[in-house]
Amino acid sequence: MAAHRKPKQRPYTGSAARTAATLAFAGAATAAVLPGPAHADPQRSPAQVRAEVDRLYHEAEVATEQYNGAKEKATAAADAVDTLRDEAARRTERLNASRDALGSFAAAQYRTGGLDPSVQLALSSDPDQYLERASYVDRMGDRRAAEIGEVERQVAGIAQLRAQAKGRLSALAARQAELEKHKATIKTKLADAQRLLATLSPAERAAYEGADGARSAGRADRGTGRGTVLAPDARAAEAVAFAYGALGKPYVWGATGPSSFDCSGLTQAAWRSAGVALPRTTYTQINAGQHISRSELAPGDLVFFYSGISHVGLYIGNGQMIHAPRPGAPVRIAPIDQMPFAGATRVT
């Protein structure tokens, strides 16, 4: 019954789970870094190190988008499990009420000696009363048969809901395993990239990371090209304005704002500010509107990169975009020819 129902638990989602996952990964990332000072690989030049770091960051971003997709599916599966459990609880309450009614009827029969109603009526000395009660008992018999049938249907329905919940739990477990796999990949790639960067001299690393200008990128970029090209409509203008407001905020994989973003998290948040719900990942955002050619680009359009559609930015005009590049590189303005162009979508 409802009074005895255990409090609903969400073991797979929520801040507690995210905190536990963060702590676990912090430990995993620490374990992944080799102890002792870093030493340059004599077989690699600084240019080769930078190229290898670029590759690792790109592979980490691919895994990040896969993580984002798996997380979205895991959340949906957890919500479905909760919905099924709630419905099963409501139906169980109704089932218990129906059973209570049948129990009352059975108790009444027991108190009358458990005699069949037709026998009880046959013993009546009043013929008129007999006929009246016989008709009533027939009706009651039909009603009780219907009630019993309804109870049986309720039991079958609850069993079906529980079977569906079990299937959803299995799907959720699979999504969780997928999440863990992508998280491990991301952490490994980022740790490897940091280890390689540590082999560069401070000047070489500063040049790679753009340290001279990265900290002021938000301030310096806020006026660059802003207002020189008009967005095609008010919603696109709002998305572009949001992206400008995010300049200088850090890249954090899996983040959707407001204080940090990954690449698809930034474009999703920008268009969300304009009242448009974009999907979570790059490979789903590319189908969230009308595909357009590079020559048709207008401010607010989504621009995608690499053959696997693993990176996205928000076009702002003049061949420029605002995007969240990678760990260590804050949200910034960059030319769209900085990476292999894969396509563009106009949000509709």
Image: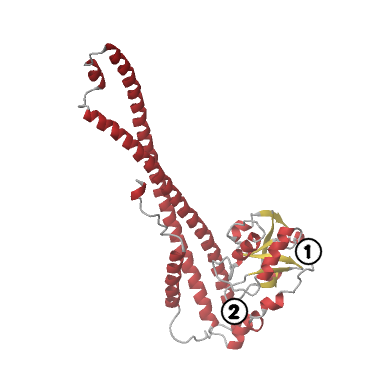
Mark 1 belongs to which amino acid?
Leu
Task: Please state if 325 lies on the left or on the right of 38 as rendered.
Answer: right
Which label number is shown at residue 50? 2
Who comes first in sequence, dot 1 or dot 2?
A: 2
Which residue is disc 1 drawn over? Answer: 230
Task: Please state if 19 lies on the left or on the right of 199 as rendered.
Answer: left
Disc 1 or disc 2, which is closer to the eye?
1
Q: Nearer the viewer, residue 132 or 217?
A: 132
The N terminus - image quarter: top left
Mark 2 belongs to which amino acid?
Arg
Q: Residue 217, image x and y in percent?
A: 67, 78
Is residue 146 depicted above or below 79 in this figure? Answer: above
Residue at x-position 44% and y-position 77%: 30
Q: Residue 175, image x and y in percent?
A: 46, 57
Task: Please state if 316 lies on the left or on the right of 267 as rendered.
Answer: right
Identify the secondary structure beneath mark 1. loop
Residue at x-position 26% and y-position 31%: 106
Q: Residue 172, image x and y in percent?
A: 44, 55
In the displayed image of the protein, which residue is found farthest to the top?
127
